[in-house]
Image (tube, helix red, strand yellow):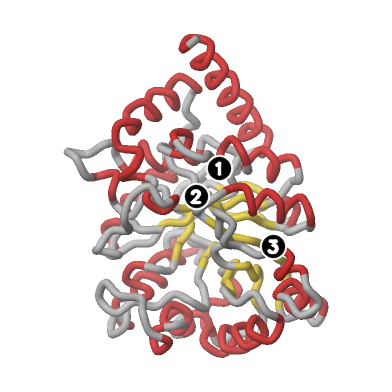
């Protein structure tokens, strides 16, 4: 029986890898001469049916970028990301931290404000994604107004419903109500304030699957790390649906807020990134604390080669003993006290 389960998983991964190959990949072209003024190019994939191309590695604007009192460091990281070829940045009206705490309305929008220090000069170099965590029309519109102001732009490329919850905690019908968030998103798109609409979540694939089956969202941001298969799998239950609908798929929680480095190093950053990038995703977002982390991740992305199904199976087995630790965001263990690092 175990052999049959293994073979079924192997065949499932083989089909996913084939889907990844069908997406196509514009490879890393090398650093062009500085005299051309052209910045380095990361490998790129199509962003679903949006018509856009995005680098396979992108910035999740948490970690240092969302920390109060670290504007200078945040600005340096953001500029360096764009300089090194990142063209997709993900933030949220929620993101803001003070040390290890995210409690307090005064913290909301810190990440967006730090991005707003850079974007006026570099807006045309970035596909910009942000989110609203409010499920009402009025609340979402207030978030959009503050996001546009914080980001110092008049256009959001992708506006997303933040953190779709599982376990019966999400009122899906509220999202679709006449005074719900979706009506705000459609109005903002129709009036040219946003271009595309998406959803995000890391707790449970079930309500997210219901949403993408009920409405033609353009994108889906989901938790996709190497431990995923060991509990309530996004890869099994949600990813194939999004691929069938030609949605842009963004992966997060790749290093599980640095927990992949615990217990003597469960897997390396290269294994973590390459595992998820071997899936049919458009890009992965990772938050960073330091330029050195950024440079390491950029190099991994430049050198990316898809894993085989057997290599993916081997990584899945490596992380199995630590699944609760690595899937904390699904409620299997406590959230870490330290919120910094490669944490998205």
The residue carrying mark 1 is 234
Residue underneath mark 3: 172
Category of crowding for the residue at label 3, using alpha-carbon neighbours closer than 10 angstroms: few (below 14), some (14–19), many (at least 20): some
Marks 3 and 2 sit apart, C-alpha to C-alpha, by: 20 Å
State the residue in front, 125 or 60: 60
Name the residue at the front extreme: 168
User: Residue at position x 71%, y 70% from top?
Assistant: 174
Q: Is residue 20 above or below residue 213?
A: above
Q: Where is residue 63? Give x, y as percent.
A: 34, 67
Q: Earlier in the sequence, mark 2 or mark 1?
A: 2
Residue toward you, 84 or 46 = 46
Q: From where the camera sits, is residue 101 visible?
A: yes
Q: Secondary structure at mark 1?
A: helix
- In this image, 292 relative to 228: left or right? left
Q: Quadrant of residue 313?
A: top left
Q: Secondary structure at mark 2?
A: strand
Earlier-in-chain disc, 3 versus 2 = 3
Mark 3: secondary structure: helix
Mark 2 near mark 1, Cβ–Cβ under 8 Å?
A: yes
Residue 97 x %, y %: 34, 77
> Where 143 sits versus 260, above or below?
below
Residue most toward the left? 264
Rounded to the nearest whole Å, what is the CA distance between mark 2 and mark 1?
A: 7 Å
For image coordinates 54% across by 22% down, the residue present is: 9
Q: CA distance from mark 1 to mark 3?
A: 18 Å
Marked residue nearer the N-terminal end (1 or 3): 3
The 10 Å Cα crowd at callout 2, few under 14, some 14 to 19, many 20 or more, is many
Q: Which residue is mark 2?
A: 223
Q: Nearer the viewer, mark 3 or mark 2?
A: 3
Residue 49, given in percent of the width and then of the height, sits at: 75, 52
Number of other residues with Cα within 10 Å of mark 1, as a class: few under 14, some 14 to 19, many 20 or more: many
**248 up-or-down from 126: above or below:** above
């Amino acid at each position: 029986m175990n052999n049959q389960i293994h073979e079924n998983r192997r065949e499932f991964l083989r089909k996913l890898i084939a889907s990844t190959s069908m997406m196509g990949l514009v490879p890393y072209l090398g650093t062009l001469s500085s005299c051309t003024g052209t910045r380095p190019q990361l490998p790129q994939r199509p962003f679903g049916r949006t018509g856009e191309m995005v680098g396979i590695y992108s910035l999740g604007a948490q970690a240092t970028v969302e920390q109060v009192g670290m504007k200078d460091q945040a600005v340096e990281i953001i500029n360096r990301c764009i300089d090194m070829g990142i063209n997709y940045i993900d933030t949220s009206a929620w993101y803001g931290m003070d040390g290890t705490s995210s409690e307090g309305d005064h913290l909301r929008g810190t990440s967006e404000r730090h991005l707003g220090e850079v974007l006026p000069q570099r807006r045309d170099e970035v596909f910009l994604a942000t989110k609203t965590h409010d499920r009402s029309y009025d609340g979402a519109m207030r978030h959009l107004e503050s996001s546009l102001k914080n980001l110092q732009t008049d256009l959001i490329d992708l506006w997303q419903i933040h953190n779709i919850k599982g376990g019966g905690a999400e009122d899906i019908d509220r999202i679709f109500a006449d005074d719900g968030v979706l009506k705000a998103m459609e109005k903002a798109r129709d009036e040219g304030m946003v271009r595309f609409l998406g959803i995000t979540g890391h707790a449970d694939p079930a309500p997210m699957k219901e949403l993408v089956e009920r409405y033609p969202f353009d994108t889906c941001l989901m938790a996709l790390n190497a431990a995923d298969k060991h509990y309530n799998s996004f890869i099994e239950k949600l990813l194939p649906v999004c691929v069938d609908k030609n949605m842009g798929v963004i992966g997060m929680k790749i290093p599980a807020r640095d927990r992949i480095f615990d217990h003597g190093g469960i897997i390396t950053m290269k294994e973590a990134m390459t595992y998820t990038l071997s899936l049919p995703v458009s890009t992965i977002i990772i938050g960073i604390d330091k330029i050195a982390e950024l440079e390491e991740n950029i190099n991994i992305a430049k050198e990316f080669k898809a894993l085989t199904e057997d290599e993916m199976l081997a990584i899945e087995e490596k992380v199995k003993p630590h699944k609760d630790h690595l899937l904390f965001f699904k409620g299997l263990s406590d959230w870490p006290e330290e919120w910094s690092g490669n944490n998205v």
